[in-house]
Image: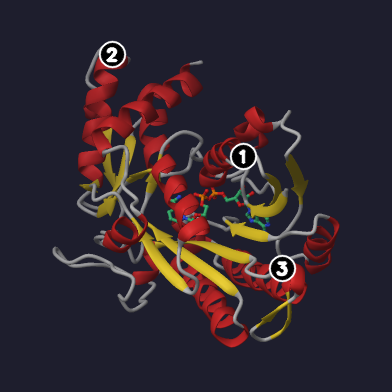
Amino acid sequence: MKNILVTGCAGFIGSNFLPYFLDKYEEYNLINLDLLTYAGNLDNLKECDNNSRYKFIKGDICNRELVEFIFNEYDIQGVIHFAAESHVDNSIKNPGIFIETNVNGTFTLIDVAYKKWMNKPFEYKKNYNGCRFHHISTDEVYGTLAETGLFSEITPYAPNSPYSASKASSDMIVRSYQETYGLNTVTTNCSNNYGPKQHDEKLIPTIIRKALAGEYIPIYGDGKNIRDWLYVLDHCKGIDLVYHSGKEANIYNIGGRNERTNLQIVDSICTILDEKAPSEKSYKELITFVEDRAGHDRRYAIDATKLENELGWKADEDFDSGIVKTIEWYLEKYNG
Ligand SMILES: NC(=O)c1ccc[n+]([C@@H]2O[C@H](COP(=O)([O-])OP(=O)(O)OC[C@H]3O[C@@H](n4cnc5c(N)ncnc54)[C@H](O)[C@@H]3O)[C@@H](O)[C@H]2O)c1
């Protein structure tokens, strides 16, 4: 048995990843360290409660004593690091916590891992050879794109929001532990995820929730900002592949080749809701344009060729299939 520390798995992506990973690998115990901020919810992990290979610890990734205790107590042999402050709008209002969690938290985790697993730079301790630190990051570190072009692993970093700047900084810290100490790291930079268990504050849950409540559906600016949407389980499968088979010191971009404007997203969701939960008028009549987000990146789009060619990853869902599953999940949540 191997003990793996996973962080932030009471949040959206982690809570989709954890049951998938736990089920797939009977040889792993998973220890989930999560502070349960407003974004974490243990209801997301109810299905794992009775699994003897799963342990939840409430705590802060910035708490070095606690992180050291966990590494020693559970003899941690791998890390998959999801925990972060993740909402761009919050980072505009309150950037400090993003620096604290995303930068200092990542530093604390990786520094403890280095000291636990290695004697000195480029020399692993006998029982920890090859222990890997997998850092989960975002395509937002690359900044914004014009109408054409895609983000690849060699696109220069140009983060624009405090959120993306804090994630870019954490990516650089991870890189430095690889280059300076020879710690075995991989980083995945993924595009926008959607699917079950996402926090109410994010775009797709907001659209569904507001529509069902008969409230105005707020869309930033002209609604023409483009994101590359990936169904969350496809992200989880990509993480699994990279954690196990990705080349050390490498970055892999994950994205579904599903570019959509926010207007297309809201339009698709309203069309499906009009069928599945008809109201007197079309939900499209609730769409309202609101003042744009400050510094709103225009377009993100990922080139996932490296992950596809090297590791054989392919998204199982396209937007049309994934969004139906997603809406069905939220209909259950909001309408009971
Ligand atoms: N959601 C996306 O579309 C997306 C896309 C690409 C990358 N990512 C990255 O994936 C990771 C997970 O994103 P998400 O959408 O699941 O985020 P989320 O906000 O839904 O969840 C974050 C989790 O981290 C926990 N957390 C926050 N601060 C903590 C701390 N100091 N110590 C311990 N736990 C803490 C929260 O309680 C929560 O459970 C993040 O690193 C994010 O940058 C997200």
Q: Nearer the viewer, mark 1 or mark 2?
A: 1
Give residue 299's position: percent from left, percent from top.
Answer: 24, 60
Asked whether disc 2 touches disc 3, contact meaning CB atoms under 8 Å apart, the reply is: no
Looking at the rendered structure, the secondary structure element under dot 2 is: loop
C-alpha separation, residue under disc 1 versus residue under disc 2: 38 Å
Which amino acid is tagged 2?
Pro
Foreground residue among 20 and 138: 20
Q: Give the residue at x 63% y 38%.
A: 41
Mark 2 highlights which residue?
Answer: 278
Give residue 102's position: percent from left, percent from top.
Answer: 58, 66
C-alpha separation, residue under disc 3 versus residue under disc 1: 22 Å
Mark 1 or mark 2, which has the lower sequence index? Answer: 1
Give residue 331's position: percent from left, percent from top.
Answer: 42, 21
C-alpha separation, residue under disc 2 versus residue under disc 3: 57 Å
Mark linked to residue 22: 1
> How many other residues sit within 10 Å of disc 1, few (<14), some (14-19) or many (≥20)?
some
Which amino acid is tagged 3?
Tyr
Q: Give the residue at x 63% y 28%.
A: 47
Q: Nearer the viewer, mark 2 or mark 3?
A: 3
Name the image quarter holding residue 21.
top right
Looking at the rendered structure, the secondary structure element under dot 3 is: helix
Which amino acid is tagged 1?
Leu
Mark 3 or mark 1, which has the lower sequence index? Answer: 1
Q: Is residue 275 above or below residue 190?
A: above
Name the image quarter holding residue 104.
bottom right
Q: Give the residue at x 55% y 82%.
A: 176
Mark linked to residue 193: none
Give residue 250's position: percent from left, percent from top.
Answer: 44, 71
Mark 3 highlights which residue?
Answer: 128
> How many other residues sit within 10 Å of disc 3, few (<14), some (14-19) or many (≥20)?
some
| Visible residue check, residue 152 | yes
